[in-house]
Image (cartoon, grey):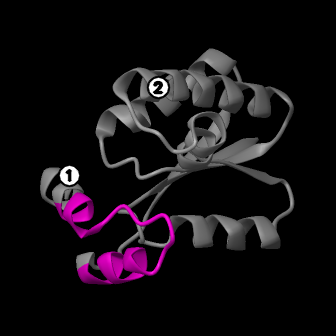
Amino acid sequence: MKKVLILKGLPGSGKTVYAKEVMNREKDWIRISRDNLRDMLYFGDFSREKEDRLVYYMKMILVDLLREGHDVIVDNCHLDPNHIALIHESILFSGIACDVDIKEMDTSLEECIARDSLRPDSVGEKVIRKMHDRFL
């Protein structure tokens, strides 16, 4: 049975590092990330309209990968429950039976802020605190 692993956590919580560790251990996994698609398509520019398109693209990529027989790691924050619901909706649309797991990253707020500050593409402390206050 195919697997879908949904990573959930603040920016800087270690989601991408965890995804890469899984992919290095088990070669059947493919990672999809809205951040990477945003960078590729829009040079990181954010707008509601672009984000809606990205969600659509992510859903189609997920369905296609499952139909091709891959296990998939979805590497986004997924703090909003609607984002996880969209993944489940996509899996149902694919018609493929999957084991779906959610891995919640339990990294502290302070550690996420510290890690994020070291990145060239930092989202910033203000954004991370806002996400934390809204969803956690």
Amino acid type, residue under disc 1 in the picture:
Phe
Q: Position of residue 52 (x, y in %)?
A: 44, 22
**On the picture, is 133 further left or further right than 2?**
left
Residue 123 appears in the figure: yes
Front of the two marks 1 and 2: 2
Amino acid type indicated by mark 2: Lys
What is the number of the mark on residue 50?
Answer: 2
Mark 1 nearby-residue class (10 Å; few <14, some 14–19, many ≥20): few
Tell me which segment is drawn in magenta: 110-129
Instruction: List x then y, in percent, for residue 75.
Output: 56, 53
- Nearer to us in this view, 42 or 61: 42
Q: Are marks 1 and 2 in contact (CB under 8 Å)?
A: no
Label 1 to label 2, Cα distance in Å? 22 Å
Report the residue at 42% width, 71% height from top: 12
User: What residue appears at the point 49 percent right and 50 percent down from the top-left corner?
Assistant: 76
Q: Residue 61 lies in what quarter of the image?
A: top right
Vertical side of 5 occupied by 126: above or below: below
Q: Which residue is mark 1?
A: 135
Mark 2 element type: helix
